[in-house]
Image (cartoon, rainbow, N blue to C red):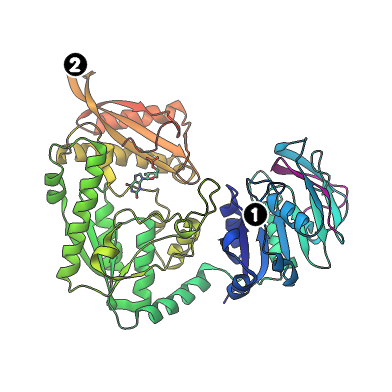
């Protein structure tokens, strides 16, 4: 087992970023909510060090969160961040007061004495930029602690008791606005906690394969393959673990983008030699959706039809004992909610939601411990093609939710598919694919008048959308230069019969969503 660090979550919006940074440093970590940890659970987890996250509460408030008292007697190195620092101070005999200097945003941190946390990043007397976000502040540090750094609004911006290996920072090292933060967290987990940094996707691959073999034994596994990153990585990993005990079912809705269905078949059946059922169900999906234009009804019909087809195909191959799913770590983290007590946020995998219960199969979820960027790294490690592993997110209902306001037909899908392919081709050629979170074309339910050559045209308009985002929850439209947009529009109008006008969507999320439906 890799050396591991436990992050105790006090409900900060950015707790996940702490975990990301620690893992980027090659150290396995998990996030556990403060109200679910105890000295016993920390020991059982095998933590070599503990990080206390930030959080929205005030330590001065009655009943506000604390670390388990016994934590400080376990002999483990501890790093408190923001609220975590305040809780640590308060629990060890220091003092925290509501701040009259609230500090939000960039601040300058001045180092006053050397400290292992800042090794190689800053020396006494240096000033470095950090990101602050706090109301309360520490006004007296606990016995045995020294002040390591100060800022204008936080006289105890970084503190340490190096004998006990307890550290606290008022700022947020996990966000990119603290440029030294990455190194600081790396110093904590490597130099202070002493973790080896052996959490790599190469190691994970071997470890997970052994785990899957043990879980599955001689059982049979079925995996729904969509061509997306998560299900592709699950399929490749399981195939390596259990070979022909795995059958993949690719339900082709007919709403895939240009060339995608062919790629799934050629990669998994031809290259990896995986048992793959490719079910072309496009007629069925189109007939079920006949006459439908309401987005929610479309989604519901697509979801239900998908489950029916998947079940039928699973029965046709003789059933299975296990269903494989591409559940990721962000879907299983129990985050602390201060509005309604601790809440469990578990998002069911879009297309196969509800399947496990209906099909009475056990689940195999080999990606449960991974963040998305780790899944991509694992995919590369397993030899999946780069364009599959680095693919933009694509919704389960596919192109069906990119033809708003009109009935879905093969003709409309074909028009949209061609426009979308040209747009993505130009984005790739311009070297922009990887800086954009998601880009796609939408076929609009309006026809407009145009003139091509000497003739009048009366064709569809399409909209282009491109956004940047970190998690899909919020997004900004991508500011292409006009020459680029003009080039794409020209190509679409010239090459796609049926479209004579192109617009660019400049809505951010919120108030828009990324998809149009
Ligand atoms: P919205 O449109 O809500 O989308 O801003 C946020 C992200 O989720 C994707 N999306 C879906 N993904 N099944 C999925 O797997 C769906 O039904 C679905 N709807 C939206 C969307 O593409 C974006 O990345």
| Visible residue check, residue 111 | yes
The mark closer to the camera, 2 or 1, is 1
Q: Is residue 350 left or right of residue 136?
A: left
Left or right, residue 262 beside residue 128: left
Q: In x, y percent, where is residue 295? A: 26, 38
1 magenta-colored: no
User: Where is residue 259 shown, x and y percent of the image?
Assistant: 26, 50
Residue at label 2? 454
Q: What's the residue at 69%, 50% (across, down)?
A: 83
Give coordinates of residue 260: x percent, y percent.
28, 52
Quarter for ligand 1?
top left
Q: Quadrant of residue 19?
A: bottom right
Please tell me which residue is depicted at 71% across the width and 71% down the height of the picture.
Answer: 194
Q: Compared to 143, does 466 lie above or below?
A: above
For the magenta stretch, what is the residue range? 120-142
Q: What residue sits 51% from the left and 68% below the top?
A: 201
Figure quadrant of the N terminus: bottom right
In front of the other: 498 or 342: 342
The residue identified by callout 1 is: 65
Picture quadrant where residue 360 is located:
bottom left
Q: Crowding near pointer 1: few (<14 within 10 Å), some, many (20+)?
A: some
In percent of width and height, residue 405 lies at: 23, 31
For ligand 1, tell me if the residue under mark 2 lies within 8 Å. no
- SS label for mark 1: loop
- In which quadrant is the C terminus drawn? top left
């Amino acid at each position: 087992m890799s050396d591991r660090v436990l992050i105790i979550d006090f409900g900060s919006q950015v707790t996940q970023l702490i975990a990301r940074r620690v893992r980027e440093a090659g150290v396995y970590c998990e996030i556990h909510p403060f109200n679910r940890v105890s000295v016993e659970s920390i020991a059982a987890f095998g933590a070599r060090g503990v990080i206390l996250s930030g959080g929205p509460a005030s330590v001065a408030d009655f009943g506000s969160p604390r670390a388990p008292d016994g934590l400080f007697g376990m002999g483990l190195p501890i790093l408190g961040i923001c609220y975590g620092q305040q809780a640590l101070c308060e629990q060890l005999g220091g003092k925290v007061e509501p701040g009259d200097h609230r500090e939000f945003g960039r601040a300058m941190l001045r180092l006053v004495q050397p400290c292992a946390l800042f090794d190689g990043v800053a020396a006494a007397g240096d000033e470095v930029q950090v990101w602050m976000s706090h109301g309360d502040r520490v006004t007296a540090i606990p016995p045995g602690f020294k002040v390591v750094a100060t800022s204008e609004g936080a006289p105890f911006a970084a503190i340490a008791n190096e004998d006990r290996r307890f550290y606290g920072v008022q700022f947020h090292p996990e966000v990119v606005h603290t440029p030294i933060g990455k190194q600081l967290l790396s110093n904590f987990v490597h130099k202070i906690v002493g973790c080896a940094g052996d959490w790599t996707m190469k190691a994970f691959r071997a470890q997970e394969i052994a785990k899957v073999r043990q879980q599955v034994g001689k059982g049979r596994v079925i995996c729904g393959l969509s061509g997306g990153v998560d299900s592709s990585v699950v399929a490749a990993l399981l195939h390596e673990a259990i070979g022909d005990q795995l059958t993949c079912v690719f339900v082709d809705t007919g709403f895939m983008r240009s060339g995608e269905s062919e790629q799934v078949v050629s990669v998994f059946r031809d290259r990896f030699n995986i048992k793959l059922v490719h079910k072309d169900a496009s007629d069925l999906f189109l007939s079920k959706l006949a006459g439908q234009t309401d987005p929610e009804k479309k989604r519901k019909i697509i979801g239900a039809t998908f489950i029916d087809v998947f079940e039928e195909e699973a029965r046709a191959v003789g059933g299975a004992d296990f269903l494989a799913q591409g559940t990721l770590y962000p879907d299983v983290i129990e985050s602390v909610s201060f509005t309604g007590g601790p809440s469990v946020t578990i998002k069911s995998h879009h297309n196969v939601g509800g399947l496990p219960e209906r099909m009475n199969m056990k689940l195999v979820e080999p990606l449960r411990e991974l963040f998305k960027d780790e899944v991509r790294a694992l995919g590369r490690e397993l030899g999946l093609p780069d364009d599959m592993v680095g693919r933009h997110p694509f919704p389960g209902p596919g192109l069906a939710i990119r033809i708003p306001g009109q009935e879905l037909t093969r003709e409309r899908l074909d028009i949209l598919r061609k426009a979308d392919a040209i747009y993505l081709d130009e984005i790739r050629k311009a070297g922009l694919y990887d800086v954009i979170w998601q880009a796609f074309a939408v076929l609009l339910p309006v026809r407009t008048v145009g003139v091509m050559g000497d003739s009048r045209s009366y064709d569809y308009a399409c909209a282009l959308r491109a956004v940047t985002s970190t998690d899909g929850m919020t997004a900004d439209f991508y500011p292409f230069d006009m020459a680029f947009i003009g080039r794409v529009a020209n190509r679409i109008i010239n090459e796609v019969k049926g479209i004579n006008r192109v617009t660019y969507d400049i809505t951010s999320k919120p108030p828009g969503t990324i998809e149009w439906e």
